[in-house]
Image (cartoon, helix red, strand yellow):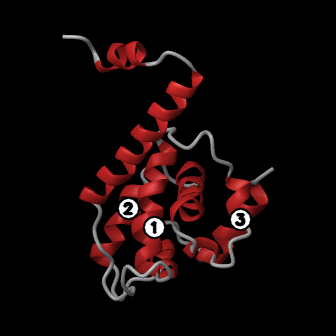
Amino acid sequence: HLSIRRQRQMCIRDSNDRALLTEIEGVLVHELTHLYQLEPIGAGSYDHKSEFWAFIEGEADAVRTTLGYTKDRNPQDTVNSPLKWLGGYNTTGFFLDYIARTYDKDFLYKFNDTARTVYPWTFEKAMQATVGKSVSTLWDQYVRSLP
C-alpha cells in the first residue's frame, strides 16, 4: 500500500495541481469538522447572520486554518467585515485560530464544548468561559495583531 503522502505526491504535477488538491483537502477538513461540532442552544439558527451560524462555519474554518489549509488566504482581508467575529467562515475562523494560538492550544475544543455548557449561548459567554475575556476585547487584540 502506498502511503497517503506518497499518493498525494504522485497526483501533483505542478503548482496548479497542488493548489487544487490543497483546496479540496481544506474543504474536506471543514466539512468533516461539522461532524464533530456541537450546536449552540439559544444562539439563533443557520441563517448566515446569527451567532449560531458564525459558530458553526467559523469553527470549521478555524480547524481548517489551524491545520494549514488556508495559506492562500489573508486574515487582513477579513477584518473589515461589519459583522466582525460574526462574519463566519474565514473571518470567524482566523479570529478563533488567533485565540487558540495566543491563549490556549486547546481553545477550539473548549470553545466547541461551550455549546454544551453555556445557555443561552453567545460568543460573549463562550469567550468568558474559555479565555476569561470579552469577545470585543479579543477581536480588537486580533485586529491589532495583523500586519
Q: Which residue corresponds to mark 3?
A: 79
At 71% from the left edge and 65% from the top edge, which residue is drawn?
Answer: 79
Disc with the residue nearer the chain's start (2 vs 1): 2
What x and y, as percent, mark residue 27? 41, 47
Mark 2 vs 1: CB contact within 8 A: yes
The reply, left or right, for residue 81 in relation to residue 85 is: right
Query: Residue at image x 29%, y 62%?
Result: 37
Across and down, in percent, residue 91 comes to: 60, 63
Q: Report how far apart the C-alphas of labels 1 and 3 lie in the structure.
A: 22 Å
- Judging from the image, what secondary structure is the residue with disc 1 in? helix
Numbered circle sitting on residue 120: none
Q: CB of mark 3 within 8 Å of CB of mark 2?
A: no
| Quadrant location of the N terminus in the rendered image | top left
Observer-side mark, 1 or 3, equals 3
The answer to whether 135 is drawn above or below residue 67 in the figure is below
For the residue carrying disc 2, how many other residues have a C-alpha within 10 Å: few (<14), some (14-19), or many (20+)? some
Residue 136: percent from left, percent from top: 65, 77
Disc 3 versus disc 2: distance between alpha carbons? 24 Å
Q: In this view, does 140 lie above or below 17?
A: below
Residue to which mark 2 is pinned: 110
